[in-house]
Amino acid sequence: MSCLMPTADINQEAVIIGGGFYGAAIAIYLARQRGLKRIVLVEREPALLARASYNNQARVHNGYHYPRSFTTAYRSRVNSPRFVRDWPDAVKQDFTKLYAIARRNSKVTAKQFERFCREIGARIQPADPALRALFEPRLIEDVFLVEEYAFDSTKLASWAERELKECGVQIRFGTRVTAISNGPNGTLQVAVQPDRGADELISCRYVFNCTYSGLNQFKGDFPGTRTGLKQEITEMALMQAPPALQGLGITVMDGPFFSMMPFPARGLHTLSHVRYTPHLHWNDQQGIDPYQKLKQYERASRVDRMVRDVGRYLPAVLEAKYVDSLFEVKTVLVKNESDDGRPILFEKHPELPGCYSILGGKIDNIYDVLEKLDAEIF
């Protein structure tokens, strides 16, 4: 077992664990809004926003997705315009977005969906006949034109890298955090394991655990999250859209659920399906490394089954060309499985004063996190 040796830069104000969008945005917030000077961001990958921030549907939610969770839908409605305003270069708006309601097995009817959208203040109108003609009318009750966008994670990564540099945040790529412990005089000690070089201890006042699927994978005094988490290995199929579907984003809900959304980072579309996108799931616990499970997973694509089922509702998808699949671990709060809600997880650990665990299910949840941090005294 390697010996942990202190380094010359042990005295930090904050350590951010995880260089995804949330970790980067929180580090920038702490430097710019809260005046922290010595911040270290630790990321196990060789680049920012390389895991869950990239390997997802790239949807900037505007509430439509959550008719069974009013709180999640309303927060999306509040946060989406802010996200578009704050990251305009990373948001793709030049496509037409449709939501369609299935006739059978849907948990909402078209009338209920329309009423729900008006309640949260989301724009909605009937789609014109040319767009309706894309769908199989025996399976689709109604089709609506809505306002919903996609984001380019590579542009968000460029923003994060630039801002972190300007803020003087030290980034440690290729480095894992293995333990968080109480240190002397009210400090916290973070054990880090670089891909190259000796293990180290970083002493700091605050730790922000923004590791998404890795939230509970630390030793030392870290107690784990009180909120139960479920892990899923998921597949997003990357497709070359046929001419009839180019310039469109389509979601069919709410039951036989699928989406085909622009994926700006690759100039393709993602295809996801409620039945075939999740491959494997388990309840999160310490000692079961989600990233190791993903690494060992065989990753056999289910795209054929996705296309076959989606093609019943949207025949043009049968002409789409499969390019690749994005496999990733998705983390959700167990308590929200029934209503599909996506609240943030924001936990302070009394056993480790100054240590926070933070998780958001959607990119626009970042504003909910920052509001929580605004109330904290640093």
Image (tube, grey):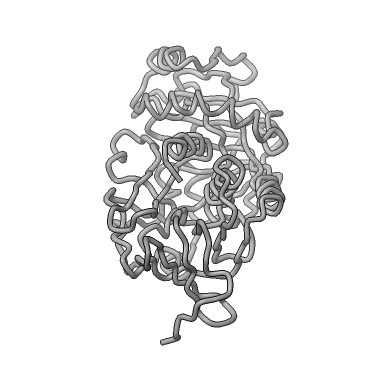
Q: What residue is rendered at 61% in x and 66% in y?
A: 173
Q: What residue is rendered at 61% in x and 14% in y?
A: 129
Q: What residue is rendered at 55% in x and 46% in y?
A: 30
Q: Quadrant of the N terminus?
A: bottom left
With respect to residue 17, does 369 lie above or below? above
Judge from the rendering whether residue 145 lies leftward or rightward of residue 305; answer left or right. right
Residue 186 visible (yes or no): yes
Q: Residue furthest bottom?
A: 1
Judge from the rendering whether residue 90 lies leftward or rightward of residue 52; answer left or right. right
Judge from the rendering whether residue 185 lies leftward or rightward of residue 261; answer left or right. left
The residue nearer to you, when weighing 373 against 73, is 373
Spot occupied by residue 35 in the image (x, y as percentages of width and height): 58, 45
The image quadrant that residue 269 belongs to is: top right
Q: What residue is rendered at 28% in x and 37% in y?
A: 338
Spot occupied by residue 26 in the image (x, y as percentages of width and height): 53, 46
Tally of marks: 0
The image quadrant that residue 29 belongs to is: top right
Spot occupied by residue 116 in the image (x, y as percentages of width and height): 41, 16
Residue 311 visible (yes or no): no
With respect to residue 335, does 54 lie above or below? below
Spot occupied by residue 34 in the image (x, y as percentages of width and height): 54, 42
The residue nearer to you, when weighing 40 against 276, is 40
